[in-house]
Image (tube, coloured by chain):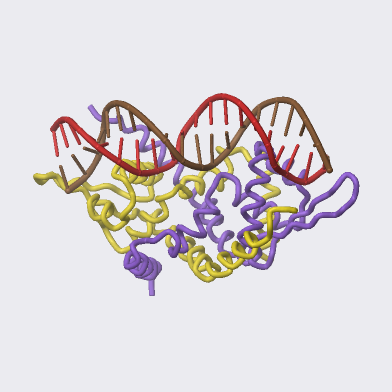
Chain colours: A yellow, B purple, C red, D brown
Amino acid sequence: MSDENKLASKFDDWQRMRLDPTRCPVRNVLDHLSDKWTTLIVIALAGGPRRFGELNRSIPDISKRMLTQCLRNLERDGLITRHVFPTSPPSVEYRLADLGRSLLGPLGVLIEWAEASHQSVLDARLRFDGIPPST
Amino acid sequence: MSDENKLASKFDDWQRMRLDPTRCPVRNVLDHLSDKWTTLIVIALAGGPRRFGELNRSIPDISKRMLTQCLRNLERDGLITRHVFPTSPPSVEYRLADLGRSLLGPLGVLIEWAEASHQSVLDARLRFDGIPPST
DNA sequence: CAGCATCCTCTAGGATACTG
DNA sequence: CAGTATCCTAGAGGATGCTG
């Protein structure tokens, strides 16, 4: 069965439940991954456990506020785990949970598509923007 | 090479360019797919060409404003094409371009992960929310 | 029908300062 | 070090009404 048909029939299924956000996996699960930072954080953790400060430095333009928030969401969804070491000063380590690791494959596929398509998209944008907005 | 290692080394590459949003495909390409509706629209078009009104109806809670905007972005990025039929009243058809169709495979993989993980995520959320916020 | 234009709301997210 | 608390702004996104 082709990708077209597989996705088309999934979409039909979702439509039957009126795309109810609480039951449609795209809307309930993927939307969460789709904010500005979450994907980046997951990928950063692919290399192994990382401490809060490390993550903060490895993603230069994220704010502590957003990093904390994204980490909490990922933890809540069971994609990562949080380990506190009661040293002084405290140190906290984040690592991918099994569920999070299982995302790396699918995510990798998508990222390879993004890399392969990057230039095509840039070209398309130039072409589109070259067309005068109307006459 | 494992998914972990592949993604980890990609991340290292991106870091070398300081995750420059204009050159990092995740930030430049995927971020665009990550708004509330774009993914759903692409999937809706997987079933074949659709008219504006059809799309509007098949995604019940999208507004015309947002539908127009997402379609423009997708067109600009070269993922879909727009075909105007000069009938009266006018009818406009959207369909996946080759580039857009090439996304269906990777997207399908991710969606299968989302479906397979949906329940685990819901369980994790319940568990997390069951833990009192502190004492 | 397919869409702009306008107005309005709400939240993602940045900046900064403070704490155990 | 790893956060929280507070404040603030930009932009995502909804509602409604108008037009070729």
Q: Which residue is drawn at 60% across and 62% down?
A: A125
Q: Which residue is drawn at 56% across and 44% down?
A: B36
Q: Residue at x 62, y 67 (%)?
A: B102
Residue A88 percent coordinates (x, y): 9, 44
View extreme (bottom): residue: B1
View extreme (right): residue: B88
Q: Is residue C11 above or below residue A120?
A: above
- Report the label total: 0
Residue B68 percent coordinates (x, y): 68, 45
Of A17 and B63, which appears nearest the observer?
B63
Q: In this view, does D17 lie above or below D1?
A: above
Residue A95 percent coordinates (x, y): 29, 54
Question: Which quadrant would residue A105 be assigned to in this image?
Answer: bottom left
Q: In this view, does B83 lie above or below A24?
A: below
Q: Is residue C16 left or right of residue A88?
A: right
In which quadrant is the C terminus of chain B drawn? top left
Residue A58 percent coordinates (x, y): 29, 58
Q: Residue at x 69, y 62 (%)?
A: A4
Question: Which quadrant would residue B81 be assigned to in this image?
Answer: bottom right
View extreme (front): residue: A135
View extreme (left): residue: A88
In which quadrant is the N terminus of chain B drawn? bottom left
Q: Is residue B42 left or right of residue A135?
A: left
